[in-house]
Amino acid sequence: MQEFWKEAVKITRALWYEEVQTCAFCGGVGDLVCPACTTGYLHPELGRCRRCGKLILKEKASCLDCEAGKGPKHLDLVTAWGHYSGGLREFIQKVKFEAQPRRLMEIARPFANWAISQLPAVDGVVAVPMHASRLAERGFNQAEVLASVIHWELGLPIIEGVERIKPTPSQIKLTRHDRLHNLKDAFAVREPRSLTGRSVWIVDDVTTTGATLDAVAGALSGSGVKTIYGLCLAAGIEKKTCAFGYLAL
Ligand SMILES: [Zn+2]
Ligand SMILES: [Zn+2]
């Protein structure tokens, strides 16, 4: 009799079970990315700097840094899904520092849809590689998981063979000059001949100055890759702070 009731409870649960959709960033019930988080972090009303991906006013083509010649040199176009702040920033930090790479699956569809609406289709995707020592520490490379997400959603092949051969310290607290120095000769391509004439998206989680994307792109273009685009989950933003100028955040 007890078994009967256990089964009855199971069947009742199965009948009533309904998967509740929650926002990947704030956990609110309703949408995959709720309207408040879309407005707050994805900023569809803003454009993206074509050179570094920074969020800028729609009528502008480049941010102030890139206009001054400080942006990436080896990429044809860069785009970022949203601004590295608030819920999107917490989401990325949970993925990386609380070992939750699976959460990237939650945003797979809208992120991939954004990517293909912004960038031309290519031969394949390249993840920004992680040095073996950091990979051993973290256990996974979030850029590789993102490249897999793009592969699953859009069917673009994953291109391997780019390696991080120099264990570079975190870029976060470095100046622009130090970032560039830090990344010098950091990446290498294992079999350059296989990449000649190809077109790729380089995928990473966050970009600020575009220096990392540019360093990978430099290694790829040196190996004969013809067209290189950059794709990130999040970038900085250039805010109009007053009538006289902009503030890069
Ligand atoms: Zn939300
Ligand atoms: Zn820029």
Image (cartoon, grey):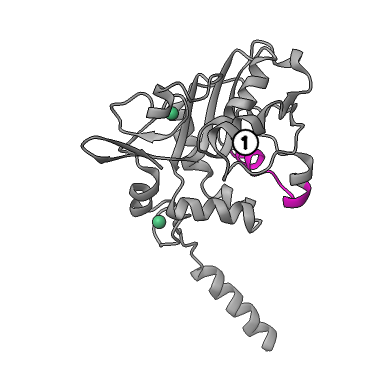
Q: Secondary structure of the magenta portion, mostly?
A: helix
Residue 43 lies in quadrant: top left
Q: Position of residue 122 (x, y in %)?
A: 57, 20
Report the span colored magenta. 136-151
Task: Tell me: 164 left or right of 235.
Answer: right
When the figure is inspected, residue 224 is found, relative to residue 190, above or below; the finding is: above
**Front residue (pair 13, 153):** 153
> What residue appears at the point 51 percent right and 68 percent down from the top-left corner?
17
Q: Residue 177 at what x, y percent from top left?
A: 57, 31
On whether residue 218 falls in the magenta region, the answer is no
Up-down relation of residue 40 to residue 120 (above or below):
below
In the image, taking residue 178 as reference, residue 238 lies left or right, namely left
Residue 188 screen position, x and y as percent: 74, 24
Task: Tell me the quadrant of the picture where the C terminus can be found.
Answer: top left
Residue at 67% across, 21% down: 219
Nearest the camera: 248 or 236? 248
Image quadrant of ligand 1 equals bottom left
Decide whether residue 150 is among the magenta residues: yes
Residue 104 coordinates in the image, percent (x, y)? 57, 48
Q: Is residue 178 visible?
A: yes
Q: Residue furthest bottom?
A: 1
- The residue that label 1 is drawn on is 147
Residue at 77% over, 32% down: 165
Q: Disc count in the image? A: 1
- Above or below, 120 against 164 in this view is above
Disc 1 element: helix
